[in-house]
Amino acid sequence: MDNLPATIAQNERIVERGFWKKLLALLGRIPFADDAAAAYFCAADPATPGRVRGVLMAALAYFVTPIDAIPDFVAGLGFTDDAAVLAMALGLVAKHVKPEHVARAREALGIER
């Protein structure tokens, strides 16, 4: 537990460096892009509690990091683990993902309502 703040800070750096680059490169190829973007905006919201930010940043860092349980380049399966981790994280903190986070995600991705 002593390393938790350092781990959260490391995850935030990973997400800040690579989240949008990877998400936009995969847009149209992954069905959970809007969920990932909503999670990002929720985590970036100063009103979001720290523990919620930590959960979301961990899930988003897992998405950004190229080395994971199922490598992203595996056709048909590469992003299933990323989607599962994100779905689990969002399930844990769903009440904190506000309509404005979803709206910002849709706007950022150019998705119409």
Image (tube, rainbow, N blue to C red):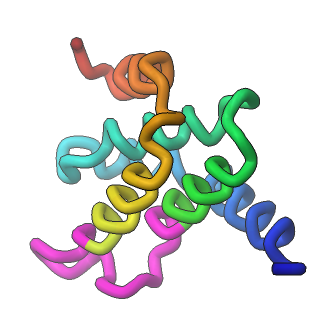
Residue at position x 69%, y 53% in the image: 51
Q: Is residue 96 left or right of residue 54?
A: left
Looking at the picture, does residue 37 appear above or below residue 15?
A: above
Looking at the picture, does residue 88 appear above or below residue 30?
A: below
Measured as percent of width and height from the top left, residue 101 is found at 49, 25
Which residue of the protein is positioned furthest toward the top in this rendering?
113
Q: Is residue 84 left or right of residue 41?
A: left
Front in this rendered view, residue 65 or 87:
87
Looking at the picture, does residue 106 appear above or below residue 85?
A: above
Looking at the picture, does residue 53 appear above or below residue 80?
A: above
Residue 80 sits in quarter: bottom left
Front in this rendered view, residue 102 or 29:
102
Residue at position x 23%, y 14% in the image: 112
Which residue of the protein is positioned furthest toward the right in this rendering?
2
Measured as percent of width and height from the top left, residue 83 is found at 29, 61
User: Is 71 colored magenta in this rendering?
Assistant: yes
Q: Is residue 55 left or right of residue 4?
A: left
User: Is 77 colored magenta in this rendering?
Assistant: yes
Q: Which secondary structure dominates the residues rendered in magenta? A: loop
Image label count: 0
Residue at position x 35%, y 41% in the image: 35
Measured as percent of width and height from the top left, residue 22 is found at 44, 54
Residue at position x 24%, y 75% in the image: 78
Please state, as top left, top right, bottom left or bottom right, where the C terminus lies in the image.
top left
Measured as percent of width and height from the top left, residue 76 is found at 10, 72
Which residue of the protein is positioned furthest toward the bottom in this rendering?
69
Please state, as top left, top right, bottom left or bottom right, where the N terminus lies in the image.
bottom right
Tell me where the magenta segment starts and ends, as one range.
62-80
